[in-house]
Image (spheres, rainbow, N blue to C red):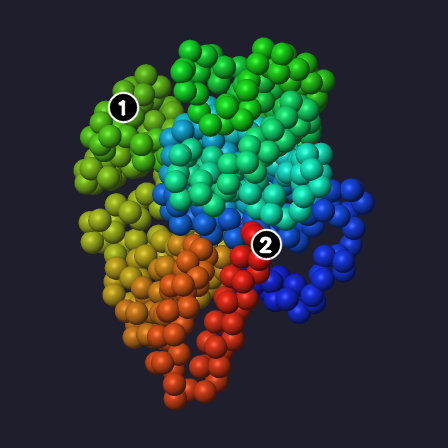
Amino acid sequence: MKFLRPTLLTLACLLASPGFADDLPSLGDASSSIVSPQQEYQLGRAWLGMLRAQVSQLSDPQLKDFVETTVYRLAETSQVQNPRLEFILINSRELNAFAAPGGIVGVNGGLFLNAQNEAEYAAVLAHELAHLSQRHFARGVEAQQRMQVPVLAAMLAGIVMAAAGAGDAGIATIAGTQAAAIQEQTRFSRQNEQEADRIGMINLGKAGYDPRAMPNMFERLMRQYRFDAKPPEFLLDHPVTESRIADTRNRAEQEKKGGKEDSVQYQLMRARVALYYEESSGLAAKRFRALLEDNPRSEYARYGLAIAQIKASQLNDARETLKPLIAKDPNNITYNLAQVEIDVANNKYADAQQRLDRMKVQFPDNYPLNQARVDLLIKQNKPVEAEQGLDQLLKSRPSDPDIWSLVADVRGLSGNMIGSNQARAEYFALTGDYRQAQQQLDIAKRRANNNFQLASRIDARQKDFAEQERLLKEMMN
Ligand SMILES: [Zn+2]
């Protein structure tokens, strides 16, 4: 198999040495003797698959790229050790974000809607990363009762349950209410919250942001949701009180000033998210236009108006709206991708391709640009070239189910049926459906019956999946 995902490599290593937990270097804290970081990692990946199967996601390459880039940058200056992060962007306008054991980072669309600038957005994520780096999850287990992996599994279930929206019957059954209740008491204890605030804020400053963004964010959330009968999940877990605001305010004053507050790019991503949650593109255009009239220099309003017009198929208007932005910042990827969208919608494929080729010279490894190139190749009915482009993308995104799903489609179009089944299998495994993953590989194996090498590779992959599933079941029981 050409594209082994890191997850599977890890699992393969673990399987090769039974009793692996003993071979791992000790982190020096008592908690690692109970739930090892490797076990956290595996369980985290497993729960991510289940979460992916349960919730609607924002499969927007630009948003995904933004979240991944900003969180990795934060992780660099955080105390998170050896961050191997996986991300999920949840299609919900409710404010929430979480970082779960195993390096799973979840961000709701609602975080963009609520955080007014990039520093506020980063403040929430820095706080979440601090829960992860301080291993509040594992420590909580130890404090409560000396239980092992099953409790962590249940804790993850609790986090996932919250992320998927409370009351999700499927996940709730798996979770078990008792263990989920333990999780409520431990991760969000006042002490842990204080520690996450403190360490998150230090990290915020180190990453170059203005630490005052944290009290600012808390303050605005408190004002906004003060009289809400049902505040967002994030505030249930993280009650914002006057004293917490005062605490973080004091601490922020002691930190170095003059950090970054905002970026144009963050505002552009906010506009994208806002558009997802507008009732109609017409209504969105109206709202962005009103904002632009109030503040003619706002990139947020102008870009928002342009993409709302694209969505409403008002392509000429969209081009005119976008023009001043491209004139001002000709190499901006987001603006250029909007122009590409307009060209594609106008069937001007050559123009779109020229623009993408020019951008690719400057940003050869940019995910959204490369994704747009693949999309254009598919539109131009060039599945073989599209498949090559996707093979490149897989190298940097080997555990992205969005990519695997598209790979399966494109290989089908180019007549690579076995490859299509294999890609579909990877997609199903990443979204927690091992049964369908095995079925896809059964089909692939039948199709490959006169190619011994290929058939045995598929066979090996089936065994990987079976082992993965067995291991997870074992850990969760
Ligand atoms: Zn917290």
Name the element at disc 1.
Answer: helix
Nearer the observer, 356 or 61: 61
Q: Is residue 117 visible?
A: no
Q: Residues within 10 Å of mark 2 (few under 14, many from 20)?
A: some
Mark 1 vs mark 2, foreground winner is 2
Q: Amino acid at mark 1?
A: Arg
The location of residue 202, given as percent across then percent down, is 69, 28
398 left or right, relative to 201? left
Quadrant hosting residue 286: top left
- Determine which residue is flagged by label 2: 475
The location of residue 361, given as percent across then percent down, is 46, 56
The residue under the point 28% across, 54% down is 351
The residue under the point 29% across, 62% down is 378
Nearer the observer, 119 or 264: 119
Q: Is residue 127 above or below residue 48?
A: above
Q: Residues within 10 Å of mark 1 (few under 14, many from 20)?
A: some
Q: Amino acid at mark 2?
A: Met
Q: Across the whole image, how many numbered discs are drawn on residues? A: 2
Q: Which residue of the protein is positioned furthest toward the right in this rendering?
A: 28
Give me the C-alpha separation between circle 1 and circle 2.
Answer: 50 Å
Mark 2 and mark 1 in contact (Cβ < 8 Å)?
A: no
The residue under the point 66% across, 15% down is 247
Name the element at disc 2.
Answer: helix
Q: Is residue 412 visible?
A: yes
Of mark 1 and mark 2, the one earlier in the sequence is 1
- Determine which residue is flagged by label 1: 287
The location of residue 349, given as percent across then percent down, is 25, 56
Q: Is residue 215 above or below residue 111?
A: above
The residue under the point 40% across, 63% down is 435
Nearer the observer, 166 or 48: 166
The location of residue 158, given as percent across then percent down, is 52, 38
- Numbered circle sitting on residue 396: none
